Image: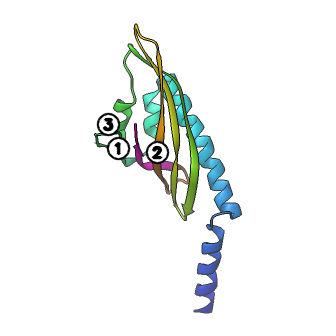
Amino acid sequence: MKALLSASLLLAVAAAPGSAQSAAVEEELDALRSAFSAALVAGDGETVASMYTDDGVLLPPGREIRGKDRIGRYFTTGRDYVQVAHSMIPDEVHVDGNTAYEIGRWSSTTRREGQGEVTASDRYLLVWRRGADGRWRIVYDMWHR
């Protein structure tokens, strides 16, 4: 019993905010956010979709999109629409074992054919899950506009 309690305590401390493990996860998530934004700007819906779990849920304003394939189609833009820039800056990241919760601010600049660039920014919420392969993927993605 004492060994079980000690092991549980060690796991709780290892995943506690501010711990070395938590900091390492936050670095991983920083890299994934950058890769997400780069793929979005490149128009690479397949790479964006690969960053979601198979059962991922995308909650853009007024919509609900379920499943990695549908999410990939959502992020695949037409020729008349270009993602010029994109970023996500977290205000809070909480790591709890194989789940991470993140709240932050996104910024996006787009351009439609024959129109100028439009920049928007608002809040987002991401829930990440670490899979059996050790990779972090997005389970829930929601933002305001």
Residue plotted at (46% across, 49% down): 125
- Assess whether mark 1 and mark 3 are in contact (beta carbons under 8 angstroms): no
**Residue 70: numbered disc:** 3
Query: Is 66 part of what is drawn in magenta?
Result: no
- Assess whether mark 2 and mark 3 are in contact (beta carbons under 8 angstroms): no
In this view, the residue in front, 112 or 67, is: 112
Tell me how many marks there are: 3
Residue 51 makes an appearance in the image: no
Residue 137 location in percent, x, y? Answer: 48, 48
CA gap, disc 1 to disc 2? 10 Å
- Provide the residue span drawn in magenta: 137-145
The residue singled out by tag 2 in the image is: 124
Q: Residue furthest top?
A: 114
Disc 1 marks a residue whose amino acid type is Leu
The vertical placement of 1 against 143, above or below, is below
- Assess whether mark 2 and mark 1 are in contact (beta carbons under 8 angstroms): no
**Left or right: 128 as drawn, with respect to 80:** right
Q: How is the image coloured?
A: rainbow
Q: Please tell me whether mark 3 or mark 1 is closer to you in this view.
A: 1
**Residue 59: numbered disc:** 1
Disc 3 marks a residue whose amino acid type is Arg
